[in-house]
Amino acid sequence: MRVSVEVNGQVHERDVEPRTLLSDFIRHELGLTGTKVGCEHGVCGACTVQLDGEPVRSCLMLAVQARARSLRTVEGLADEGALHPLQRAFSEKHALQCGFCTPGFLMSIEAFLRDKPDPGEEEIREALAGNLCRCTGYRAIVEAVESASRELRGD
Amino acid sequence: MDINGLDELAYLRRSGGALHVGALTRQSTLERSRLVAEHWPLLIQAVRQVGHAQIRNRGTVGGSVVHADPTAELPVALSALDARFHLRSPRGARMLTADELFLGPLTTALDADELLVEIELPPLPAGAGTAFVEHARTHGDFAMCGAAAVVVPNERAAIALLGAGPRPLRAGAAERALAEGAAPREVAALAVEPVEDGYRRALTAELVQMAVEEASP
């Protein structure tokens, strides 16, 4: 099936098998390998992307279901090579080790901070609950989110 | 077949005091609805425990219903709220109660050519308190056991159980006892009588007691 989808502001058109997962489409067809594939059944959060601004699991959608919709992947966060404040905070606070889960975290939290610019720690932990990290123990990730939220608010 | 394109099935409306939920309403839309928070708070209490935000952004209310997982939150909450399920097929329309719709694990009374189009909820009785309590091994996972309660003290009550059987179960005897003023512990003991497994029975009794206490103003 012919699919036309906007990804990070650029329109892509491809012929895809109807059963192609959105996550595989993003990685294999578009070559955007920042989005990672972990569990492939909606649990780990590594494949999280934004669909019309809202975080969703790209492994739980078919590529054809993203037709005429707008996607944002981790490649869409940095602005002309300058890291997004959230990316910078992750780097500064050591909120990643192997980095496999990081793109999913970033896409979840970027949307969360738009909805809730000044979250408390409990709210941050709740917002992180849909993404698994096996390296950090989450403490540094919570700190990174706190730090990024301050910067994004201009505090 | 993918029905995601049927935008006309995504709506939340209140008319004549009743709530009409289109089958394709996203769980996150339900979660954010002020209308629902004000008049049917049990739905908010239940939907918050469905998966994670990323799941609720795609998951639909109707999808959760027709999937009929006996440990899913929304079917249990809808059962406690006396929901009516509107089905449509080329042959016509019909309406089922939760008892008629949910037959067993992942099994409903829907015929092969039928589609769930709307869930209708009567208004909550005046003065009702509600609670949804569950226990899951991992945050955001399907719960093992749980309970939904709607309580108008000394007047009426609804209790629905999650994970206590092959489908959402209403605890009729416990509801009647609660309406007549029985203590939460007695109510819980009555509610879990049909639960066979010992661990689930003990866990469900705790959860029913918590739900009843929380829902009683």
Image (cartoon, rainbow, N blue to C red):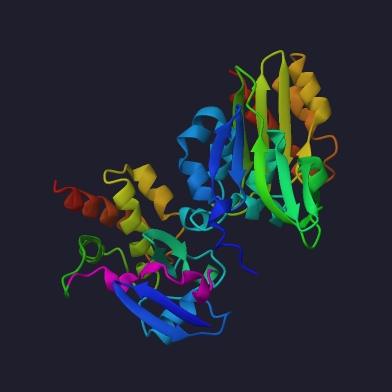
- A88 relative to B205 in the view: left or right: left
Q: Nearer the viewer, residue A106 or A1?
A: A1
Residue B107 belongs to magenta span: no
B147 lies left or right of B52: right
Residue appearing at x 42%, y 77% in the figure: A4
Q: Is residue B60 above or below residue B176?
A: below
Question: What residue is at 66 percent from the left and 22 percent from the top?
Answer: B151
Which image quarter is the N terminus of chain B in?
Answer: bottom right
- How far from the left and from the top, in percent, is residue B192? 80, 35
Q: Which residue is rendered at x = 80% and y = 21% of the image?
A: B176
Q: Is residue B103 left or right of residue B80?
A: right
Percent from the top left, x then y, of residue B180?
77, 14
Figure quadrant of the C terminus of chain B: top right
* Left or right of residue A41: residue A54: left
**Which residue appears at 64% of the width and 55% of the height?**
B63
Q: Tell which of B80 and A87 is nearer to you.
A: B80
Magenta region, residue range: A61-79
Give x and y (percent) for residue A106. Answer: 33, 63
Q: Is A89 rendered above or below residue B180? A: below
User: Which sits in the foreground, B149 or B114?
Assistant: B114
- The single residue placed furthest to the front in the displayed view is B91
Q: Quadrant of residue A30?
A: bottom left
**Viewer can see residue A33:** no
Q: Is residue A67 magenta?
A: yes
* Residue in front for this viewpoint, A126 or B105: B105
What is the tally of numbered marks visible in this picture? 0
- Quadrant of res A48: bottom left
Give the percent coordinates (x, y) of residue A153: 18, 48
Question: On screen, A135 above or below B200?
Answer: below
Is residue B17 at least partly visible in the picture?
Answer: yes
